[in-house]
Amino acid sequence: MFFTLILENANGDRVDMTTTANQYMTSKVEGLSPPPGTISTSSYAGMDGSYLNNAFIEKRNVVIHFEMRGVGVEARRHQLYKVVKPSRYIKIYYATAGIDVFAEGYVETCEVNNFEMLTTGQISILCPDIYWYSTISQMAYYSQVTGAFTFPFPTESNPEPFVLGKYNTKNMMEIENDGDETGFILEIEAIADARSPTLYNADTDEYLQITGDILAGDIITVTTKTGNKTVTLDRGGVKTNIINRLVSGSTWLTLREGRNRFYLRGTGLQNLKVTIVHTNAYLGV
């Protein structure tokens, strides 16, 4: 199977593990499948079977086995050490004919056998975030005035005016999730003052509400991803944690597999621009 595998450090330095036969030849990649699950159970006293205490998925461990051939092996080995450093952040790009994804983690080991006839090596990367993410994000928008610029321009033969924008009377947003169930990023931008915007899941009736006033120019960013749940207010370039403004009963909404529908409620919705930013997440690729 043809694939590409690229490693990138925090500075943006890259090493392509699938360049040519005279560079790095990746012979095996472990950790592409879903990580193992850990299931804890306890036995009933004097009864058959057991009951579930908890179940969760372990961190992902990506292990890359490779060979180094041709001339300049030593120079390429030092280039590899420059990008792939133990305990440091690393981003893994993996692509095939059908998928283009990345995962983020930290280098556990980077070992190269220097004194063998064939120079081989192994890189172990631990990923606390268990998902592979698509390199392309999807977005769903809400604004009462939406762009609708069309051609052609009016002429003598076609005097109809062209459309610069349309007034949106619906407050529904739809977005498709082609990966596993995961969180998303919600961005709320205030053109003028508004109050207490609420995002409802039209299929489950769950909601996420931010109480209080939103002033013109405010930008609120909500992240609902597991392990990274935040509510941040950007006012005049100053960012503040406002997670305390989440209304009791609010749910950290997620995107289920397939089509997801959300609608908005609040005071002054016509003054808000709302964006849902989603990236497909996969347990296995």
Image (tube, helix red, strand yellow):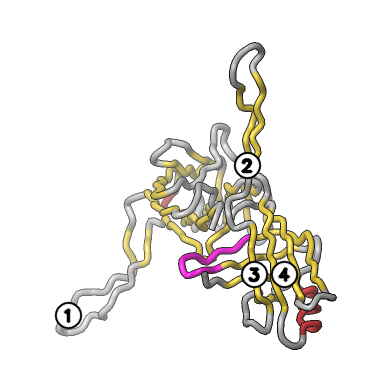
Residue 97 seen in render: yes
Question: Residue 102 appears in which quarter of the rendering?
Answer: bottom right
Question: Under tag 3, what secondary structure?
Answer: strand
What's the amino acid at mark 2?
Answer: Gly
Badge 4 amino acid: Asn
Q: Which of disc 2 and disc 3 is earlier in sequence?
A: 3
Camera-nearest residue between 33 and 211:
33
Quarter of the image for residue 19 reads bottom right
> Looking at the picture, which amino acid does disc 3 mark?
Ser
Q: Residues within 10 Å of mark 2 (few under 14, many from 20)?
A: few
Residue to which mark 1 is pinned? 158
Dot 2 corresponds to which residue?
A: 37
State which tag comes first along the sequence, 4 or 3. Answer: 4
Image coordinates of residue 65 in percent, x first then y, are: 69, 66
Give the camera-side residue of 17 and 267: 17
Mark seen at residue 27? 3
